[in-house]
Image (cartoon, rainbow, N blue to C red):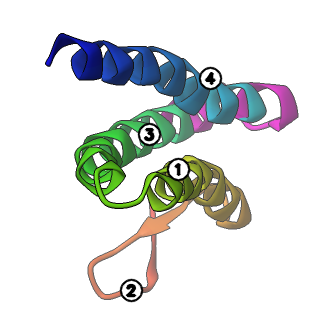
Amino acid sequence: MPGTLTIWLIALAFFIPMHYLGPVAVLFLTGNEPPELRRRRLRAILIDCTLTIVIAFPFAAWLFERSPLYAGLLFLGMMALPYLHLLRLRRRPAGVTASPNGNGAER
């Protein structure tokens, strides 16, 4: 059905820039970290945005057939995840990264 495909392409064209640009803008406008740390955080945020799109979009498309309201709420919830990840990265000390045992490991 070309109409449905067109609607989903328009939704993606709107959702993707909004999903990436918000967290990246917050990272650059509110951060005062050194350039190397900013690059690591930017990479982490871009990966997080990509993963949430890859996970949320097919699930929301499937859910849209049953309940458009829940599909929209899923999109909004997934858009919040990169911001929460950025907040978590900012709370972590600059030289500490996650390690397999759950404790911080110095870089």
Circle 2 crowding by C-alpha within 10 Å: few under 14, some 14–19, many from 20: few
Q: Position of residue 85 (x, y in %)?
A: 57, 57
Question: Image point 76% across, 34% down: which residue?
Answer: 26
**Could you tell me which residue is drawn at 80 percent across and 36 percent down?**
31
Q: Secondary structure at mark 2?
A: loop
Q: Which residue is mark 1?
A: 72
Q: Per the image, is 34 magenta? A: yes
Q: Mark 4 or mark 3, which is nearer the start of the sequence?
A: 4
Residue with the mark numbered 3? 49
Seen in the image, is 72 located left or right of residue 93?
Answer: left
Q: Which tag, 4 or 1, sits closer to the chain's start?
A: 4
Q: Which residue is mark 4?
A: 21
Label 2 with label 1: CB-CB less than 8 Å: no
- The residue carrying pointer 1 sits among few (fewer than 14), some (14 to 19) or many (20 or more) residues within 10 Å by Cα, namely some
Q: Say which residue label 2 marks.
A: 102
42 left or right, relative to 4 = right
Count of marks placed on residues: 4
Within the image, what quadrant is residue 99 found in?
bottom left
In the image shown, does 60 or 87 lie closer to the viewer?
60
The amino acid on which the numbered mark 1 sits, given as a three-letter code, is Gly
For marks 3 and 4, give the CA distance. Answer: 10 Å
Q: Earlier in the sequence, mark 2 or mark 3?
A: 3
Graded by Cα atoms within 10 Å as few (under 14), some (14 to 19) or many (20 or more), the crowding at tag 3 reads many
For marks 2 and 1 on the same chain, the one whose residue lies earlier in the sequence: 1
Comparing labels 3 and 1, the label whose residue is closer to the camera: 1
